Each structure stands twice: as structure tokens, then as C-alpha cells.
Amino acid sequence: MTTAPRTPDTAPSYATPLAELAWPFEPGADTYRYWINVERGRRPVATAAGSWGRHVLEVDGGYPAVMAERTAILDREPRRCSALPHALPAAWEALEFGLAEIAPQRPDLFRLQRGDDGVLRWRNDLLGTRWSARTGDPLVDGAHPLAALAGQVQEDLFLLGPREDRLYVDAVAATFTGSWSSSFSLGMSFADLHSPVPRIRDSGMVDRTERFLLSLDPGDVYRRTNWSIYDSGRLDASLEASHRRDPGHAVRSATEHRYGSLRLRVELQHLVRLPATGALLFLIKTQLAAFADIVTVPQWAGQLRSVLAELPEDMAAYKGFARYRPGLLDWFDL
Amino acid sequence: MTGDDRLTVAAVEQTTVDVRSYVLTSHRPLRPYEPGSHLVVGLDGVRTCYSLTDDGTAPDAYRISVRRTGRGGLSDALHDTVRVGGQLSVSGPRSAFPPVPHARHHLFVAAGIGITPILSHLGAARRWGRSCSVVYGYRSGAAAHLELVRRLAGADLVEAPGRTALASAVAEAVERQPVGTHLYACGPRAVLDLVTDRCAAAGWPPERVHVEHFTAPDLDAGAPFEVLVRSSGRRLPVPAGVSLLEVLERDGVAVDHLCRTGVCGRCRIGVLAGTPEHRDLVLPAALRDAADRMYPCVSRAGTAELELDL
Ligand code: HEM
């Protein structure tokens, strides 16, 4: 019993090593609900299989594979990166922040230098990138500064700016989002972005979250996780890429699927209040782990089964597994 | 940099007869800041805010300018006691007067020492090529940073020596501005009132008018109070400026928590007696008066003592 999509899906499958997975469930909890699960960043957390969370942007073992796929997507669809004109200073601040964050993680591959002449020089020997630019240049190596950063890091990047006490998406550089369109989100308000999510829109949670984000101090770094279930290890699950997939695939695979090849898709999200521009940098690192691998960690297997069994129907639908929940729970019990 | 930091006074410059500029440095890298930010300077238990005058993008030092008031107070104490090589205790920078990046045009109005945050804005506007103009009102012979403002603003500067000249320069600038302009004003109370009145008369939407008062920031340390921990019977003082959560932690009382800013709701504890003063963002409007629970990371007491269900 294997899935056989009608059109070949050439996107490579990606697997995050379990030792690096940002396990999204609270220790000991056997249920899950939406809440404002934010905590300060840059603190490692131990899990049943390893640990995560040391860095804000992190170059992990998947870097070469992830960057190869990102480069292919950006070459094909440059509109995955877009920015409003006034976001240039924030994009520059994000670029300098991001490169400074990853440079020390792989001194063998990366080199970041600020010359006495004020010129910033970047070199990435793995990707063969080499450029120099001055803070404020409209283009860095031919790309918008946020796109230039996206070309060097695994995370999806969003810049939000406050306008009359609300947050709006001012710039986007993203290739691996879940089933939504990041390019469509440019210019949208924080509230509108969250309007499709069941439960949270009317609970006051969106408003509270927005007030929290607006009140962050310069330089603050917070993080949270989000999760859902997908039927493939494809990093790019975005609406932009949906035309490349067989439209019946998701539904059919729901019934035919070998449950072990379902993927837990974890988004490790960081929120950084950039100090010089006041903009909010929102980072999403997408991680994927097959159920068959997750259940090799007994604590995870038990917890995931309980959470999935208990989750209310509307959330299960939003998380992508309501249709085949009974079969999936049986599979856990095998 | 949320707590207090000690910075070294690397240089002191007499900018005008009564204004001195201080260049503060650190052996650690200094955090960038938004244009219009201020530093909170503390000396002998008194704290006052001073605007930073650079654009903040990549600071090699923090620069502030302080006017002697002749009325004592922290500004005069700085003039009297701070010398090159000395140390100052500061916190921040904090941003409470930022530029609006999507504005079509930025109109800056400064009066007197109010030029300090405007100088920061002007530098940033020039760095990023934002369209701007400046009205600078001053007493003749006592204009801080005038040469620098002239150099940065060039033809976009209107100088107004004296209050009458300033009033007409403001009136004219406010009338002339294109749609989409944001105005930023810093100066004494009377000048800010003048600016806001003029803008209102000219039909400016209030969201486009930003003023910076010369007042202390809302540090909101809260009043001291006491808590009684039910399980241990221990009585703990909570000083101003210290959160109840910190006090409990220091005393070895474990309280589960995450955000420490009053949004996640994780640190909720039960209250048995006394009335909490809720400062969190968690409790919905209908529960803002609830006396049986509180979030100790931010909330404090409305009564002298609280008994906690811990
Ligand atoms: C502390 C900050 C945030 C909180 C607490 C929060 C909360 C949530 C929650 C609970 C969901 C439902 C997810 C699910 O069940 O799959 C969601 C979805 C979403 N959020 Fe946020 N969010 C935050 C920040 C942001 C930011 C900064 C953006 C800006 C791009 C954003 C964009 C979205 C979008 C587009 C979705 C729908 C797509 C999806 O289902 O993955 N969120 N958010």
C-alpha cells in the first residue's frame, strides 16, 4: 500500500534528525490547545531525543540540502521575495543580524567582515557566495537585502512593521511555508493573517499577541513552536507550489496512506525586535519528521498519540489529519 | 540592555554656554537604537532621560547633550560632577519617539535643547534618503549642534531665532506639507502645544503628529508590598521595581513561568486575601477585577499585603 501521485512530485523529501527536532509538546502534557506559547530565545531545551534552541538562526546538518532546494525555488519563482519600499532599512538590519548570527557557527565556511571603509563583506564557501556591500545599498549581490539573507539561511523570513499600533507585513522572503501563500501576505495586517485559524480569532488571542509583539523591547528575542501534519516530506508546502502537486493527492493519501510516512511538520519560530529600526523579524525554521521515526522514541510516541486522540475536531481539521484520525490512532496501537 | 549598565565618559564637550555633550563608551559592543531614542541616566538614585543624538544604526558611542537648568537636579549634577574617564550608570536605549518609516515626508520641529532627538532623526533620514525638512527654533547664540544641523539639513532647514519667529515658521511649515507627511516635535511644553494646535487647525490627522515631552519615562516600578506564602507561612517583601515572580524565585518558591511579560498566562497563581493590581495582558475585560488569581511576573498589589495560595 503505497501512495502513487498522478503527476510526479520531484521535490525532494527532507527529514530533520530527531536529535534536532523542536518537539512542540510540553513535557508531560497529553493535550494541546492554542495559547500564546512564547518564551525567551537562545536557550537550549533538552528533548527525549536531543536538544534544540541554542541559536536564533541555526545552520544545522540539513543546511546543504535545504539551501539547494531554496536556491532552486528562488531561481524559479523570484516573487517569493518581496518588500515594500520603506522596508529597506529593516531588511538591512535583518541581513546584518542574520549573517552575524550564523557566521560564528561555521567559521570553516562563512566569513563576515566589516572593513574600516564601512563595507560589509560576506563569503560562503559552501554556496560559493561572495559579495561586498554598504549598509543601505538597495541591492546586495543583485538581490533585495532580505532576499540576500534568505539565500544564506535555512529559515523563512518576514519583516513586520508597526503602523498606528498594528503590525503589518512589510517584507517577505520565504520558500518553505505550510499551506498558505507568503507572497500574498505582503502588506497584510497581523490580524488578517490569523483570520483563517479556527478558535484564535474570536478568543482575543490575536489581539493579545499583537500587543505583546508591539511591546517587545529593542533587541528582545522570543520563540515559539507550531505544528501540523502533512503527508510528505516536501519542505515547500506553500500555496504557491500547490499547482505543482496533484490536487487529489492530499485527500486520497488520507485514506491510502501508510501512516508511518506521515510527517510531523514543526515550525520553530523566532521573533526578534530589531533595535535600530524597531521592525519585528519573524523567522520560521521548518522541520519534518516521519511518524515511523518519531515512534522510535517511546515518550514521543505516547505523547503524540494522546494529543492526536484528544484534539477537538476543528483543530484536527486545521492541523490536517481529521479525516483519517481513527486509522492513524489504530496505527499507533499496533 | 535592560538592566543598568556602566558606561565610560570618553569625552565631554562644551556645546553652547549651557549645554554639554557627553560621549559614552563601553568595552562591550553598544546596541543600535531607533532614531529618537533616549538613555536613562542615573546618579545618586535620581533617573532622567536624555535623547541620543546619533542616528543609532551602528553606534561607536552613545552621545547625549545636557543643558544646565540652574535649578539643581540631575542635569546640573552631571555638569558639576562628571568628568572624562568617569563612569555613568545608564539603562536603555529606549525608543519612545521613533520615525514612521512609510511616511512620504518627515517634518521635524525642534526648540532649544529639543534639537537632540531631532538631530538623531535628521541623521537617520539622511542615511536612508528619506525626504525631510527641519524647523529649528533657538535663542540667538545658544543653539546646540547648529553647525551639524545646518550641514545635515542643508536647504531643508528653516532657522527660527526666537519664539515669534518659531511660531510663524511652524505655521508656515504646517500649512505647506503634502499629504502623507509626519511631524515630529520636541521642545518645551509651550512649543509642543503651539505645534499641536497649529496642526489641528490645519486639519492634520493626530496620528501624523508625534511629540516628545521632556519628562521622565514611565518606568512603572510600582509600590512596594508584602506577600504571605500560605504553605510556608513566610512573609516576603516585594520592593518597588522588583517583580513578585523574582521575589518568589529568590525565596525558592517554584512558580512555573515563560514569558515574564504578562502575556503567556503561564505563571498564574491563586490569591487568598488582599487585592491584586492586574498589569498583565491575559485577563479578559470581564475578569480585570478578579481577586482570586494573578500573574506575578508583572502584576502587583492594590493592598499592602497579599496572601498567596502557594
Ligand atoms: C507570538 C506570536 C504568534 C502567535 C502566538 C501566533 C499564533 C498562531 C497560531 C496558534 C496559528 C495556528 C497554527 C496552526 O494550528 O497550524 C497561527 C497561524 C498562522 N500565523 Fe501566527 N502567530 C504568531 C506570530 C505570527 C507572525 C509574526 C506571523 C507573520 C507572518 C504569523 C502568521 C501566521 C499565518 C500566516 C498563519 C496561518 C498559516 C498556518 O496555518 O501555518 N504568525 N499563528
Image: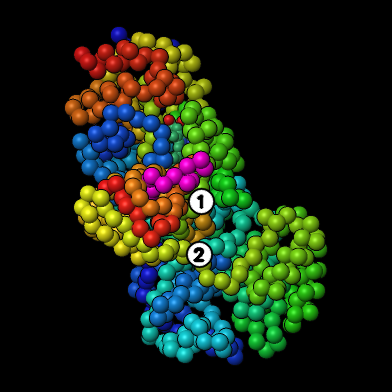
SS assignment at label 1: helix
Left or right: residue B59 versus residue A88 is left
Q: Position of residue B14 (x, y in %)?
A: 54, 88
Give percent across and percent down for residue A174.
47, 38
Q: Residue at 32% x, 54% y: name it.
A: B245
Q: Chain of mark 2?
A: B
Q: Mark 2 belongs to which amino acid?
A: Asp
Residue B192, quarter of picture: bottom right
Q: Is residue B233 left or right of residue B77?
A: left
Please state which amino acid type lies under the numbered disc 1.
Leu
| Mark linked to residue B218 | 2
Q: Which residues are magenta?
A: B285-296
Q: Is residue A145 magenta?
A: no
Could you tell me residue A130's position as x and y percent? 42, 52
Dot 2: what SS?
loop
* Residue farthest along the front direction in this orientation: B273
What is the C-alpha distance between the residues marked 2 and 1?
A: 17 Å
Picture residue at 23% right of the left edge, 25% below the top: A301
Quadrant containing the N terminus of chain A is top left
The chain letter under disc 1 is A
Q: Which residue was labeled with disc 1?
A: A214
- The spot of residue B129 in percent (x, y) is 63, 61
